[in-house]
Amino acid sequence: MYRLEYPWLLALLPLPLIVYWLLPPYKEEQTSLRLSFFSYISSAIGIEPQPGAVVPKTSWLQKILAPVCWGLVILALARPQRVEPPIQKIQPGRDVMLALDISQSMETPDFRSPDGKRLRRVDAVKQVVTGFIRKRKNDRIGLIVFGQAAYPVTPFTLDHDACSKILSQTDAGMAGPQTMIGDAIGLAIKQFDNSDAKQRVLILLTDGNDTGSRMPPKKAAEIASQHRITIHVVGIGDPHATGEDKVDYAALAGIAKTTGGQLFHGQSRDELEKAYATLDAITPQNFKTLSYQPRSELFMFPLGAAVLLLTGYHILMLIISLLLRLFASKERQAEEAATSDVFTVHV
């Protein structure tokens, strides 16, 4: 699509005609020779004296070239542009951090695949989380894994394929046998410090209890709330288990409630998928679409055409002038030669 940045400048096109009609003709005084007997000469010749004026004549080429060049210059001043199709850029409005428990207990094969095969907890979690990541096309996703310590795996990024690939390479026990939930929340808070997103969401997935974090989970949740971070907790442990295998859902619920989040139970793969489906529903994608239309300036084409036309005209006139002088010189030489021949014959 083509457009003019300043179309109102086209109103200047008839300006030369207006000037021609409204302003008086240009007059220039020149020196002259006064003859006291001029009236006798004019009467003898039979002409009547008139006010002196020399009106320069223009050729047909000048009459065509002048308005064309004026129109091209005005068109260049109006800045013609070629507008390209709009380019849309998605600006994320939310940062989502996933904190996944990969302690030794995630090796437990108590999940089942759709075909009935037994799956380890960590494998079922990775499958469901990978699907969740792929759905969040317009959210920046970050990943933390924790066990005996918490480790940042990927920063907030829109490269979800890279995030999923790194997730597939993690395995249970890589971060140690214990579960440091408070440290994982504390690390997530640090990751969010560099985020300018208006909405900040931490999804914490664990199958155990905190086993001695340097920062208690309750205190970490309070600090997260102060940083405007909402924590949703997905617990996948057996609430009826005893001893170390029992998940303290009350503590996990307290973490979620402190930050305005929710607690989900994922004791099976189906429940885990329902939990993430609910998370997907309560955290709809939030983004802003920025539209930009690239513009290419085209003013140089009419301006260049005007310059070329004027340059070509002057070059043409120069060539014609040189040719006329050359022909005149040859005619003069021919006349002089003829005069010389006549003089020689008479002599």
Image (cartoon, helix red, strand yellow):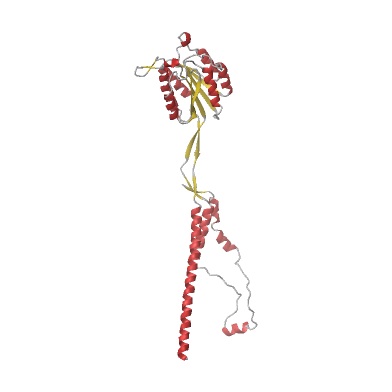
Q: Whole-percent x and y of residue 248? A: 50, 12
Q: Residue at x 51, y 59 (%)?
A: 307
Which residue appears farthest toward the top when viewing the image?
A: 242
- Front-lying residue, 215 or 97: 215
Q: Residue at x 46, y 31 (%)?
A: 159
Q: Whole-percent x and y of residue 89? A: 48, 36
The number of callouts visible is 0
Vertical position of residue 260 compared to residue 17: above or below: above
Using the rendered image of the protein, determine whether residue 149 is visible from the camera's viewpoint.
Answer: yes
Q: Whole-percent x and y of residue 266? A: 44, 16
Vertical position of residue 103 compared to residue 324: above or below: above
- The reply, left or right, for residue 38 in relation to residue 131 is right
Using the rendered image of the protein, determine whether residue 283 is visible from the camera's viewpoint.
Answer: no
Indicate the quadrant where residue 119 lies. top left
Q: Whole-percent x and y of residue 222? A: 58, 19
Which residue appears farthest toward the bottom when viewing the image?
A: 347
Q: Residue at x 46, y 21 (%)?
A: 278
Which residue appears farthest toward the left when viewing the image?
A: 115
Vertical position of residue 324 compared to residue 254: above or below: below
Vertical position of residue 279 compared to residue 29: above or below: above
